[in-house]
Amino acid sequence: MNNNLILLVEDDRRLADLVKDFLESNDFAVVVEAHGNRVIRQCQNVNPALIILDIMLPGKDGLTLCQELRPEYKGPILMLTARNEDVDQVLGLEYGADDYVIKPVEPRVLLARIRALLRRYYQTDVREQEVLVFDQLTIQPIQRKVELAGQEIHLSSHEFDLLLALANQAGQILSREFLFNQIYSRPYDGLDRSIDVRISQLRKKLLDNPENPTRIKTIWGRGYLFIADAWKD
């Protein structure tokens, strides 16, 4: 993976040139792709550290691409959207985007989001690099890989970060605000329920009964609790 290379998927040539020039002036290398049908191959060719993906594209749209990229691409995906109404969909768990910026793009806001995503994704302390094993659950922080009973579980970047935060503090109740600050680059406003939604999706992927979860428990009024000895079968 090229740690300073960004794949920018944007069909608006003027905007693409503006973003490319600004990011290159801040020590990033940028490859621009304008057509949705070529993004998967381009990603395989350049192996970027981060993808900036517009929703509206010729060929495949950005949400479809995000969904298709996720099983293989483990890096962060930042979406560009022209409408506030798209935000919930952009960050929807079925798509796996990590963050978003609303157009018109403010270059310094975009740069801050990119740096926050890259920092969270690539810079972990020594303890967080250790492989975590809970009976049949294995979490590999460096490879960003999760296996359950020998089968790889495909998680989005945020889902992985959320699981890692919970597992690193197994047996401790973690508040929504704490978990939010572990995985997002924007302030917590107290009303955001994206952590609840991502917890629900994690439970589904990790075979934890959402009606009566025993692996990632909800502690009402306080937060969530990862149970270390609940992964035997």
Image (spheres, helix red, strand yellow):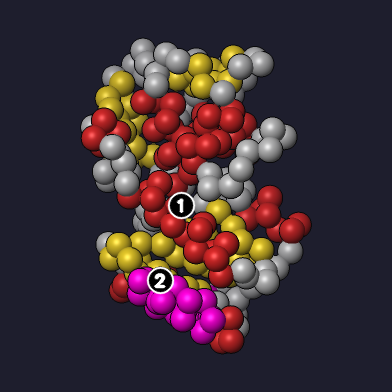
Sort mark 2 into few (<14), some (14-19) or many (20+) by Cα contacts within 10 Å: few
Q: Which residues are magenta?
A: 16-38
Q: What residue lies at 33% left-to-right and 27% top-to-bottom?
A: 137
Of residues 87 and 109, the one drawn nearer to the viewer in this rendering: 109
Q: Position of residue 147 (x, y in %)?
A: 32, 35
Residue 126 placement: quadrant? top left
Q: Amino acid at mark 2?
A: Asn
Residue behind mark 2: 26
Contact? badges 2 and 1 (CB < 8 Å): no
The residue closer to the viewer here, 98 or 57, is 98
Question: Mark 2 or mark 1: which comes first in sequence?
Answer: 2
Determine if the magenta segment contains residue 160. no
Image quadrant in which the N terminus is located: bottom left
Question: Callout 1, which amino acid?
Answer: Ala
Looking at the rendered structure, the secondary structure element under dot 1 is helix
Say which mark, if any, is on residue 21: none
Instruction: Name the residue rendered at 66%, 63% in the picture.
Output: 102
